[in-house]
Amino acid sequence: MTTPVVLPVKSIRNPRDLGGYCGLNGRKVKRHRLLRTGSISAMTSADEQVLLDYGLTKVIDLRSSAERRVSPDRKIAGVEYFALPLSDKANSGEKNQQDMAEYRVDQYAGFRLMCDRYRNHILTSQAKQSFRQILQLIADTDRGAILYHCSEGKDRTGLVTVLILEILGVDLETIRQDYLFSNYMLNDYRAKREKQFVRAGENDKFRANMRILGTVSDAFLDSALITINENYGSIKQYIEQELGISSSLQSKIRNLYLEK
C-alpha cells in the first residue's frame, strides 16, 4: 500500500492528503485536492497559513449542529464553508449520563455503539443526503483543495473517504488500510485521554470503552460494508442507485481528481 500523505500541521488531529493512491486504470489520486482531518476549531494561525499555501478553498464540516456550536470551525478568509452532518441527533444530558454509567459496567458497550453508528450512517436519510451533497460538491470543484472533517477525522470522515476512493477506483484493501491508519495517527490523543481518565479515577471497563470510542476497527468498517451489501447489493450500487451519483458524475470526479 502507498504510505498515506500526512499534512504538515500541528494543531489539527489526523491530517491527511488522499493523494498518491493508485486509482482507476493505474492513475494516481492527485495531491493538494482532497484533504481529510479532525476538527479545525483549535487550528493555529501558522497551520491556517499552511493549508492556504496547500491550496485550500473549501471546508466541509461533517459534525452535528450541537458539535459545531460547542467547537465552531475556525473561519479562514477566502475559504468556503459547508455544514453537511451525517447525523444531527443530539443526545440529552440525561442520555449522556446513562451512556457513561453503562461504560463503567459493560466493557463492550462502546463497541456496540460504534457498530450501530456505522450502520446508521449508511441507512439514514440524513447521512445519505449529506453523502450525496458532498460528492456533488467534490464534482463541482475544479481547482484547489477541499478539506472535510468530523471531530477526530476517523469515523464520519472515514466513511466519506471510503466513498470517494471507491469512485476513484482505489482497491478495497487500500481503502481499508487508509481507514485503519487513523489508529496510528491518534495514538497520542488516546494516550492523553487515558491519563486523564486514570487521574479521574475511572475504572478499567470505562477506560476500555473510551479506547474503543477513540479507535477505528475492521469491525466498524465491516458493519458499514455489510449493511451496504445486504441492503443495496454492493458499494457501487449504493453510490449509483441510493445516493444518485450517476456514472457520468463519477467520471467527472475521476477526471478532476486522478492524474492523466
Image (cartoon, rainbow, N blue to C red):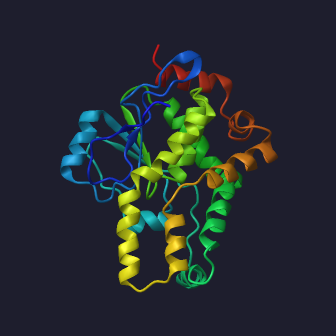
**Between 256 and 212, the one nearer to me in the picture:** 212
Q: With respect to residue 187, does 178 lie above or below?
A: above
Q: With respect to residue 198, does 183 lie above or below?
A: above
Q: Position of residue 109 (x, y in %)?
A: 63, 73
**Between 97 and 256, the one nearer to me in the picture:** 97
- Looking at the image, which residue is at 62% across and 66% down? 111
- Looking at the image, which residue is at 65% across and 33% down? 245
Q: Position of residue 99 (x, y in %)?
A: 58, 79
Q: With respect to residue 92, does 130 lie above or below?
A: above
Whether residue 20 is visible to the viewer of this picture, yes or no, is yes
Q: Quadrant of residue 78?
A: top left
- Looking at the image, which residue is at 54% across and 26% down? 253
**Between 12 and 59, the one nearer to me in the picture:** 12
Q: Quadrant of residue 235?
A: top right
Query: Along the horizontal axis of the image, is 93 left or right of 234?
Result: left
Whether residue 126 is visible to the viewer of this picture, yes or no, is no
- Looking at the image, which residue is at 43% across and 27% down? 20
**Between 41 and 196, the one nearer to me in the picture:** 196
Query: Along the horizontal axis of the image, is 226 left or right of 158?
Result: right
As drawn, the residue found furthest toward the left would be: 46
Q: Position of residue 31 (x, y in %)?
A: 38, 28
As drawn, the residue found furthest toward the top would be: 260
Q: Position of residue 254 (x, y in %)?
A: 54, 23
